[in-house]
Amino acid sequence: MSFALPPYAELLGITIERGDGPPVLTMPFGSDVLGRPGFVHGGALSGLLEMAAIAALRHALAADERGGARIKPVNVTVDFMRGGREKPTRAQGKVSRLGNRVANVEAFAWQDDPERPVAAARINFLISSGPA
């Protein structure tokens, strides 16, 4: 798997944990992602979820030998379940449908336990051939 995340991921301090399947992304807690005192900002959580969805879709496209396809998010829905606290937040995306022109991706963010997400997103992407 070789792809670069968008520049916004670097701004949030997001790193990719290598492994089998869709990558897990980690966002450290710090002043750059601080919302109200002691909590992760909702916009930073949304950004992490979007980056996780992009990483999962890039992983799926590479496996489908369409690694050079262009992707564009067209619809994003984020659900916040609980406040993210002062600790690293992880997220992973899952492609639920990969068509020729449209992909549906879900992403979940958690801190201590993947079974207790702090936020989730559903994102629809348009896919077109050509360089990313």
Image (tube, rainbow, N blue to C red):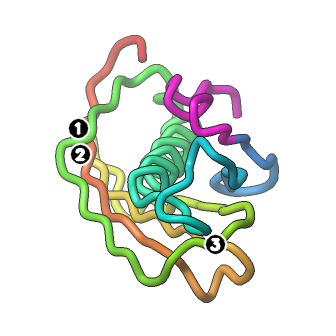
**Three-letter amino acid code at the position of disc 1:** Leu
Seen from the viewer's position, the closer of residues 11 and 122 is 11
Judged from the image, the secondary structure of the residue bearing numbered disc 3 is: loop
Write the start and end of the magenta stretch as one range: 1-14
Say which residue appears at 41% left-offset and 11% top-offset: 131
Looking at the image, do the residues carrying marks 2 and 1 touch, with CB atoms under 8 Å apart?
A: yes
**Where residue 121 appears, x then y in whole percent?**
36, 65
The residue tagged 1 is 126
Q: Residue at x 34, y 60 (%)?
A: 97
Q: Nearer the viewer, mark 2 or mark 3?
A: 3
Is residue 93 rendered to the left or right of residue 27? left
Q: Which mark is residue 85?
A: 3
Which comes sooner in the sequence, label 2 or label 3?
A: 3
Q: Image quadrant for the N terminus?
A: top right
Write the residue at 41% across / 55% down. 46
Q: Looking at the image, is mark 1 or mark 3 nearer the viewer?
A: 3
Q: To which quarter of the image does residue 88 belong? A: bottom right
Instruction: Identify which residue, 47 or 65, lies in the foreground.
Output: 47
Give whichever of discs 1 and 3 has the lower sequence position: 3
User: Residue 119 at x, y = what percent?
Assistant: 45, 72
Name the amino acid type tagged 3: Arg
Percent position (x, y) of residue 93? 52, 59
Label ID, residue 52: none
Kindly identify which residue carries mark 2. Answer: 102
Q: Amino acid at mark 2?
A: Val
